[in-house]
Image: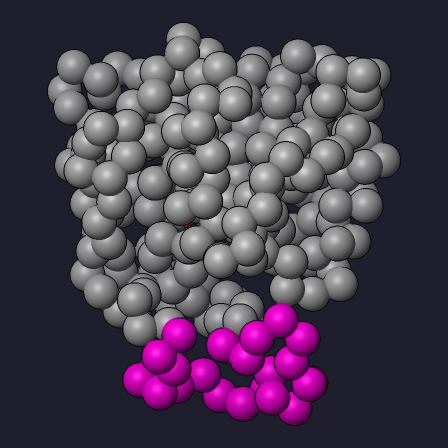
Amino acid sequence: MSSSTWLDKDCGYRQKICWGRRPPLMMALVPYDQTSLPVLSKFHDASAEFYFANQRLRLTQDWRRLGVAAVVWDAAIVLSMYLELGEIELRGKPAIELGAGTGLVGIVAALLGANVTITDREPAMELLRANVRDNVSPEQQGAVTVSELTWGEGLERYPKGGYDIILGADIVYLVETFPALLQTLEHLSSDRTVVLLSCRIRYDRDTAFLNMLRQKFSVVEVHYDAQRDIHIYKAVKSQNKQEL
Ligand SMILES: C[S@@+](CC[C@H](N)C(=O)[O-])C[C@H]1O[C@@H](n2cnc3c(N)ncnc32)[C@H](O)[C@@H]1O
């Protein structure tokens, strides 16, 4: 699939987020104009800088070429902050990030000691690899693998139940991907796996995904960033309900 096809596919999402949480249908159909929306202006920056895990990070962005996968979303910033709080033990743990985009969350998890597989769809790989190379020292790069993972596809390439931690920032937004995303979470999780999903709830369908998730996992909200309106949900396979 070419980059442009991929960009087009994500356009609906970009239009809708421009207009707040519950836009009237007509507003959502207004063509997206990249220059007239200050709320998105940070996405036009060629890079975004952060300070996590005692390190300055500089993530390259490329909104015009790759769209949603090539900018750092608030959900990634909030999840990185949450990881830094140390609520979840990362040191030496096998972790995987889904829909990583620029890779901020996976990079922070690696810098905090996890062995991380950072994944997204094929068009995101080049930028993702560059961001890992630029932000993870050669000594730490052994702790990071960048790998293509389209939800629900080729899951046999990833060990069933092989990860202690699964991370996802702003990956709940395309209703047609929900069954595949859920299938992927189930495949990757064992009964000791902690799934952390960092979400902005924009539409009822986002809540619908959480309800789908609750059929297979026990889900609790563990953090809310009011300034950015981002929720972090922790999920474990249902038989571990008491551990939440
Ligand atoms: C809104 S972006 C979030 C990127 C990053 N996690 C962040 O928060 O900055 C959603 C990400 O999900 C990825 N994505 C969407 N559908 C996917 C699918 N079917 N399989 C794998 N990744 C997907 C996109 O490529 C994109 O990187």
Q: In this view, does 232 lie to the left or right of 179?
A: left
Residue nearest the observer in this picture, 123 or 105: 105
Whether residue 222 is in magenta: the answer is no
Residue nearest the observer in this picture, 162 or 167: 167
For image coordinates 48% across by 26% down, the residue present is 96
Residue nearest the observer in this picture, 224 or 180: 224
Q: Can residue 119 be seen in this view?
A: no
Q: In this view, does 184 lie to the left or right of 205?
A: left
Q: In this view, does 186 lie to the left or right of 29?
A: right
Whether residue 37 is in magenta: the answer is yes
For image coordinates 56% across by 15% down, the residue present is 164
Tally of numbered discs = 0
Q: What stretch is highlighted in magenta?
A: 18-39
Instruction: Examine the rendered structure and indicate whether residue 161 appears above or below residue 75.
Output: above
Which image quarter: residue 25? bottom right
Q: Residue 238, image x and y in percent?
A: 81, 23
Which residue ends up furthest to the front in the rendered image?
A: 226
Which image quarter: residue 148? top left
